[in-house]
Image (cartoon, rainbow, N blue to C red):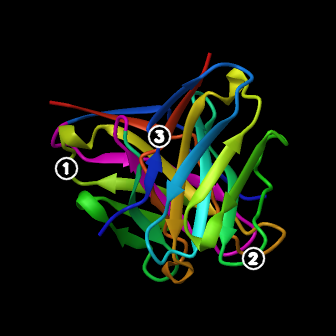
Amino acid sequence: AQSVAQPEDQVNVAEGNPLTVKCTYSVSGNPYLFWYVQYPNRGLQFLLKYITGDNLVKGSYGFEAEFNKSQTSFHLKKPSALVSDSALYFCAVRDYGGSGNTGKLIFGQGTTLQVKP
Amino acid sequence: GAGVSQSPSNKVTEKGKDVELRCDPISGHTALYWYRQSLGQGLEFLIYFQGNSAPDKSGLPSDRFSAERTGGSVSTLTIQRTQQEDSAVYLCASSLVRDNYEQYFGPGTRLTVT
């Protein structure tokens, strides 16, 4: 069964410092990986995805993620954090399922990012 | 363009009542998903619709939950005889298969069962 793990409930970083939000995955085939962000009282917003190709994926708001097949990781990164980046971040993997490609996503538990001025 | 919309944004209901939650997907999106976001439970898949295919209901937690999608567009999630454990934010998402399943989420409906 496909699964995603976000080992940190919360990440604290000072504004201007680089940030990393960790994600590891377990899939039976080629992984389709996603990062979403949720601001308070808002729905999820798509940040970036890895389907194939370059291991470094660039997304919205200056975020990027590095796909590492040997470590089964897909960590989210940003070179310089902003206070406005403070939000809840979800890593997700497409579920293959027994009936084929349904496209449904399996989400990690989420990591709260707190950026302090 | 318009994104995914959901209504109502908030719903408070008494235990035992039925509720209906509505989702309007992005026009032209053939796939529609319902998820539930509970405190301490993360995001949980409920049901998936794709075109005219039979829906994937594998995530529905009990037979009190059902959903339909009329005309390949609007979807309604119905919870019968609500229980307190049904309290959560219900999120709807839509996508185009050709976009490699990149899903666009609505703002959610916060359901509180008292």
The residue that disc 2 covers is: B53
The residue that disc 3 covers is: B8
The residue that appears at 34% across and 41% down in the rendered structure is A39
> Mark 3: which amino acid?
Pro
Name of the residue lying farthest toward the top: B114
> Where residue A87 appears, x then y in whole percent?
34, 39
The N terminus of chain B appears in which quarter of the rendering? bottom left
Q: CA distance from mark 1 to mark 3?
A: 38 Å
* Disc 1 secondary structure class: loop
Pointer 1 indicates a residue of which chain?
A
The residue that appears at 56% across and 56% down in the rendered structure is A92
The C terminus of chain B appears in which quarter of the rendering? top right
Look at the image and give the residue range highlighted in magenta.
Answer: A15-41
> Mark 2: which amino acid?
Ser
> Where residue B64 appears, x then y in whole percent?
80, 39
The residue that appears at 72% across and 28% down in the rendered structure is B82
Per the image, is B75 magenta? no
The residue that disc 1 covers is: A80
Q: Are marks 1 and 3 in contact (CB under 8 Å)?
A: no
* Disc 2 secondary structure class: loop
Q: Are marks 1 and 2 on the same chain?
A: no
> Where residue B19 appears, x then y in whole percent?
64, 36
The residue that appears at 69% across and 44% down in the rendered structure is B78
B107 or B20: nearer the viewer: B20
Pointer 2 indicates a residue of which chain?
B
Q: Is residue B52 above or below residue A93?
A: below
**Can you tell which of label 2 and label 3 is closer to the viewer?**
3
Left or right placement of residue A93 versus residue A63 in this view:
right
Q: Residues within 10 Å of mark 3 (few under 14, many from 20)?
A: some
Per the image, is A35 magenta? yes
